Image (cartoon, rainbow, N blue to C red):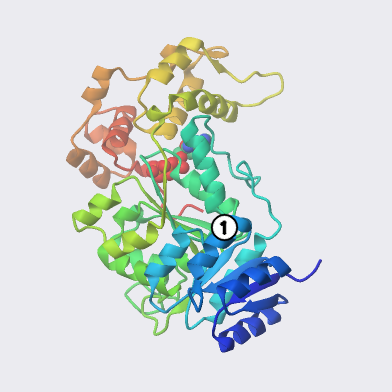
Amino acid sequence: MSRPLVLAVDDEADLLELIRITLGRMDVSAVTASTVAEAKLQLERHRPDLCLTDLCLPDGTGLDLLRYINAHYPELPVAMITAHGNMESAVAAMKAGAFDFVAKPVDLSALRNLVESALRLRGRAITTEARSGSEPPLLGDSPAMQQIRTLIAKLARTQAPVFITGESGTGKELAARLIHAQGPRRDGPFVPVNCGAIPHDLVESELFGHKKGSFTGAVTDKEGLFQAAAGGTLFLDELADLPLSAQVKLLRAIQEKSVRPVGAAREVPVNVRLISASHRDLAREVEEGRFRQDLFYRINVIELRLPPLRERPEDIRPLATHILRKLSPMAVGTVAPRLSEEAMAALMRYSFPGNVRELENILERALALCEGECIEVKDLYLPTNEERLNMLVPVGSARTALDQAHSNQAAARTLGMTPLAFEYSLARLGIEDRSRRLWRKT
Ligand SMILES: Nc1ncnc2c1ncn2[C@@H]1O[C@H](COP(=O)(O)OP(=O)(O)OP(=O)(O)O)[C@@H](O)[C@H]1O
């Protein structure tokens, strides 16, 4: 197989030479151009595997070239070289479909990482259904879910930060895993972090690492989650819960592509793709001063919204069938239990405040309770409207109970509720259910 080929476009001859030498050491060939017009000729002549272009060119901009490439060579990844500190143009380029960016003066290890990621895409036709063997599929026939699967396949091909919104249990983490699994970083780690579950005074050390002796309890050097995700994807779930001090550091990490462990004198470069999520309205958090606007702007380059299950009832049937198949013990001679048509209809009418996760819980319970092979309406134990109202507790009491108790069961007991009613209240109030929320999940 011939060596991969990169087209580097810049009007600074020295930089082109530096790129050529760096790529040569990676066994990658380079052709160069110094104008948009010349780049178009080189594209036609050489059909490169990656285009690396400066933003300001004598006869146009890198964005013009990006648009031209998107129209004529849609499979070709394009990375931007941007002026130092000019995040606006980097964000604009990624919104326009650039694969990634590297800031001037070009850091060679960042350049190498970028080129490696881009080349892994080479020759890989990612269809909307492509997925890695180990990730469960994102099911649903609704137009919304079909669009989401298409968007995920597209997002997998860029390095742009993605912000996933949606109520609790709508599949945000699953979507993030699929973006990772379908992209060039799929052989690297996927590190999910629940920002809300990390004690505030430990957030910085967890995310960025620390040096021995930097604070009481720091008995050895510790690698942070950014470093743990090197070469892969860091999924920051419940981002809205990140304290303001850590938000400043996160912003810097995104801008500089490097982090400074607590107590360290120097920053270390990190090669991580960032995906974040929140079930809270982050724009509102910004308005109310709890979330930094500049960080919001950077992590929200592309937004992926997962609609609540009640907005797409046609997805309930395929989801329920899939979940039952997954949950049933598949012993030889056994048949997976099915839902009666009445039970299916009852599910389709239900509002699912806890979304797909709640559907999983309902079916798991029904499976344990049902006699025979058919799940009936009574096995679902769906709360009636009146029960749902009675189940609700004020947000404050639910939070206090959760904070003071070690488990949901204990918290429910304090409030004189059944665990199910308590979980229902949590979902309804948008409060995290502690039993499922792990701080560091893999
Ligand atoms: N479209 C879907 N197809 C198949 N399974 C799904 C789908 N959506 C969600 N799930 C399943 O529902 C459960 C909850 O999904 P997930 O943890 O991704 O939700 P979430 O939005 O990240 O929740 P939270 O906000 O509470 O973190 C998981 O078991 C996931 O596999």
Q: Is residue 8 left or right of residue 301?
A: right
Say above or below: 84 vs 308.
below
- What x and y, as percent, mark residue 356? 44, 33
Front-lying residue, 280 or 49: 49
Front-lying residue, 245 or 120: 120
- What x and y, as percent, mark residue 146? 52, 36
Q: Give residue 217's quadrant in the image.
A: bottom left
Q: Is mark 1 within 8 Å of ligand 1?
A: no
Q: Give residue 302's quadrant in the image.
A: bottom left
Tell me what residue is drawn at x 53 percent, y 47 percent: 152
- What x and y, as percent, mark residue 260? 40, 77
Tell me what residue is drawn at x 30 percent, y 54 percent: 240
Tell me what residue is drawn at x 26 percent, y 33 percent: 413
Q: Give residue 299's quadrant in the image.
A: bottom left
Q: How many marks?
A: 1
- Callout 1 amino acid: Asn
- What x and y, as percent, mark residue 357? 43, 34
Can residue 125 be seen from the camera position used here?
A: yes
Front-lying residue, 112 or 75: 75
Give the labeled residue for mark 1. 70
Q: Is residue 26 left or right of residue 65?
A: right
Tell me what residue is drawn at x 42 percent, y 63 percent: 92
Residue closest to the far right? 1
Residue closest to the far bottom? 14
Q: Secondary structure at mark 1?
A: helix
Can residue 115 be seen from the camera position used here?
A: no
- The image quadrant where one finds the N terminus is bottom right
Say above or below: 41 vs 152.
below
- Within 10 Å of disc 1 (Cα), the crowding (few <14, some 14-19, many 20+) is some
